[in-house]
Image (cartoon, rainbow, N blue to C red):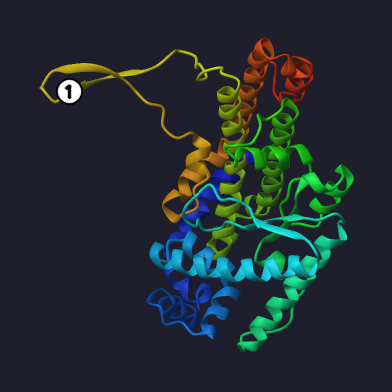
Amino acid sequence: MAAIWRILAILAAIASVSGLARAQDRVITPDVAQAMQDLWAGRATTKQRALLFKNNDAINAAAMQGWVPDSVYQQVQSDYAALNRHFASEAAREAGAGFEVQKSKSQTYTPGTDSDYITKVTRPEQIGQMQSSYNRRINAFLAENEVLDAPSDTWHNKLDTDFMADPNHVTKAEFEQIAKMNNDAYKRREAAIFEAKSRDPDAPPITPQEYHAYAQEMQDFAAKKQGKMERWRNDPTLLNDPLEQAEYHRMMAQEQKYIERIENANRILREQQGLGPMERPGGPRYEVVETADGNYAMREIEEGPSISKRGSRRNVDAYFDTVNASVMADHVMNRALGDLSASIAEAAQVNPEFRAQAAAQIADLTSEMTPAQRGQ
């Protein structure tokens, strides 16, 4: 039944394409469009910067539809990031918390991404204090520049800004409590530690518990996005609205991002444990190519980006790649979990640290699979 709704969603999306141009002015109003142009040209006023900051969610939706040139989008997001980092860091300072921006794996800004800040707190209450201070500072900034419609205490939700706790400074229970206060934050300490280690080339090796917790976290995140997508799949006509279509695309792409992260965790595990590349059934594939001297040779076909990698892209050209990937989400998720489980089993043969919990972890990661999917 879910597949039927996904197909209907695709058809509704195709039907909506002709109406996208007419909706541009509703998503990006003329004053916002002018502010983007002026910021790109280096002549934006502080009021225009405030207007762009306030409408960052709409700007991202427009960028996902292909309505904003990338050079302009990158400039707007750079300015937004600087302002947001300032408000967030001042809020952290006021709450007595340490503050750092989570290291990005990309050198450019991608439409639909959120802002994650790592904070060193000792009490969950400090997260609430930061959120309140952050919202208050934005209200003041917008009011000072005469673009505030009404004060809000939910800017951190609208602008998708999370104040996440450094897992090394709070208890397990406190970490879980803090996770509930954010939009999308890890609730397992070991998963957060995995994330930090994966971004730090000098970090110690990732432990079996951290791999397991990270995979569980990504499963939960993907399931959360799938739950939100039911709204559009139950009523595909909503996708006639370009803002709805952009948000639907963002949810699907995030679902695929979490699957891709499990695939990446498997790659890291195999590298750290010296297991070599994953072997696929059927072995490598080859093609005949013409060489520079006019002869012919056999060449191994390199494996391209995975389905989830292609599906995680958030731009208008990738929309149908993302839809197709989401249709196959259950299958691709099971494959990613199966691969990780196989790697854990291999690691257990050479590393005693993996051996103790391998059976239980594999049983958990493959619990939703059929016997055939588990290779039984």
Q: Is residue 42 left or right of residue 242?
A: left
| Residue 50 % position (x, y) | 57, 80
**Residue at the left extreme?**
294
Residue 309 seen from this side: yes
Q: Residue 226, relative to residue 316: is it above or below?
A: above
Q: How many marks?
A: 1
Image quarter in which the C terminus is found: top right
At 50% from the left and 41% from the top, the residue drawn is: 324
| x then y, percent, for residue 223 | 70, 42
Residue visible at 55% across and 24% down in the picture: 271
Q: Position of residue 132 (x, y in %)?
A: 79, 71
Q: Nearer the viewer, residue 241 or 359?
A: 359
The quadrant in which residue 226 appears is: top right
Look at 55% across and 85% down and name the residue there: 47
Q: Tell which of 338 and 209 is nearer to you.
A: 209
Question: Vertical placement of 299 versus 210: above or below?
Answer: above
Residue density around tag 1, few if under 14, some if 14–19, many if 20 or more, within 10 Å: few
- Seen in the picture, residue 179 relative to 299 is either above or below; the reply is below
Residue 292 % position (x, y): 14, 26
| In front of the other: 119 or 319 | 119
For this orientation, the residue located farthest to the front is: 202
Q: Secondary structure at mark 1?
A: strand
Position of residue 24 relative to residue 361, above or below, is: below
Can you say which quadrant of the picture contains the N terminus?
A: top right
Q: Which residue is mark 1?
A: 290
